[in-house]
Amino acid sequence: MLKDFARASRPDKAELKARTEAEQAKLAANQMRVKEAKVPVMVIFEGWGAASKGSALARVIKDMDPRFFEVATLDAKPTEEESRRPFLWRYMVEIPEAGQFKFFDTCWMEEVTYGRVRGELSDEDYEKRIDSINTAERQLVDNGYLVMKFFFHVSKKEQRRRLETLRDNPDTAWRVDKEDFWENDHYEDCMQVYDRYLRDTNRSSAPWYIIDARDRNWATLQVLEYLNMGIDVAIHNRDVAAPLRQNVFRLRKIPLLADIPLDKTMEDEEYHEELKRLRTRLDELHNVVYRKHVPVIIAYEGWDAAGKGGNIKRITSALDPRGYRVYPIASPEPHEKARHYLWRFWKRLPKSGHIAIFDRTWYGRVMVERLEGFCSENDWRRAYNEINEFEKELVDDGAVVIKFWVQIDQQTQLERFTDRQNTPEKQWKITEEDWRNREKWDEYEDAINEMLRKTNTSFAPWHVLESVDKHYARIKALRIVVEELEKACGR
């Protein structure tokens, strides 16, 4: 794309000024339209060092209301803390709320191309990150985001002139460093890497716009015109359903819930012996997980009163409290609901060597949100594939993902509900919503069966815990966790 880039004709000074002022005024008006339409807007600025990204950004936002936009500045290299999270983590936690703008002074491109041009990123890792970026951008767009990507392009000679001018002025010398001059010295190599990246991530849902940055004012006008055009299209299409995508992941067969026998039991003596043995082993493995920097994600879903809490408690009782965290997931808060539905889970992902346990998960999208009408049919139908992609991203990053469905029958649930209601110290566990959900048992069972069938992947399969006998379910869960950690740690 850079090699074939053809510069547009630059307007004269008077026309440039008039068009820029008109586009700035239009953007100010569009900002309010975006707010009313609740469209989240990501604007990504990439480009050569000293290519005027900063000055163009300042001109673009000149007439915008600062209450409704933010600017994120990200380094090419992640910090030590960030490097212990999945590649996409530090970017996904920055996505804007609905109706807000977020301007990125470099995003995922710089990290990938920086590693590539310096030989620090292998061919295989490069391809994985390209897939991750394309998937992330597509998911954002499918979920209502406008993603605008600009690359500021200047010649080698022009870049050198600007770098030297900035360096020689004491007030601007801080804006350049040896990496900028290194880029200029290796301009042709960088051009090849940048060009390939732009082509590999140029998709119709989030295309690249190459900005002729030889003149700062001209660069600003180009950004403004493209950005306003993108906003017009996004608002026009905001009610258009995103296409459903075919699943590309291998799925394992899983029985219907009604076909799973729930007569599994365990005697007290065996339970206590196994509990002691498995806790000891899990304690040992937790140390290995930490030493080997393996992130672990344990996801619990199940019927109300199925025993998730007690199950989780037996697992955590064997862990060092400094190395795990349990997340009880309730209805999303307003700031969470205003973003991509996976955002609140991206934020909670564990760093390497740590364990995150989710008491209810991202699968709420295809259960509660589906059945209670909290999202559209298109939203929850798309979610199966989006969730598979999310979990594949985690596994490819080296995480162990263990998913439990805790299964009981209607009669057992009724007995446990009644016990909770009649026992003062347990009454906090039962709500009117629990009783209402029980009335929709058949609908939920259909949705759960579909969920299990469509997300039972080879890399993140479901494990059903037969929990009429809670002792049996707890030991089964501990055995599975121990087995999966042993495999991950080579033990």
Image (cartoon, grey):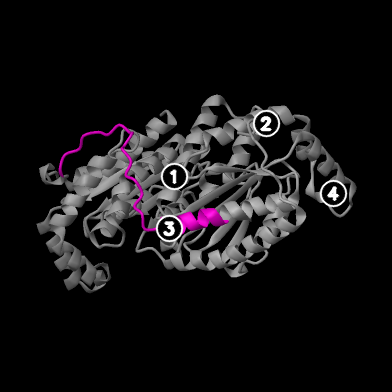
Q: Which residue is mark 3?
A: 236
Q: Which residue is mark 1?
A: 138
Neighbours of disc 2 within 10 Å: few (<14), some (14-19), many (20+): many
* Quadrant holding the N terminus: top right
Residue 288 visible to the viewer = yes
Residue 241 colored in magenta in the image? yes
Residue range in magenta is 228-256
Q: Tag 1's secondary structure?
A: helix
Neighbours of disc 4 within 10 Å: few (<14), some (14-19), many (20+): some
Q: Give the CA distance from mark 3 to mark 2.
A: 36 Å
Residue drawn at (86%, 55%) of the image:
171
- Disc 4 vs disc 2: which is toward the camera? 2
Q: Tag 2's secondary structure?
A: helix
Q: Which residue is mark 2?
A: 191
Q: Are marks 3 and 2 in contact (CB under 8 Å)?
A: no
Disc 4 or 3, which lies upstream in sequence?
4
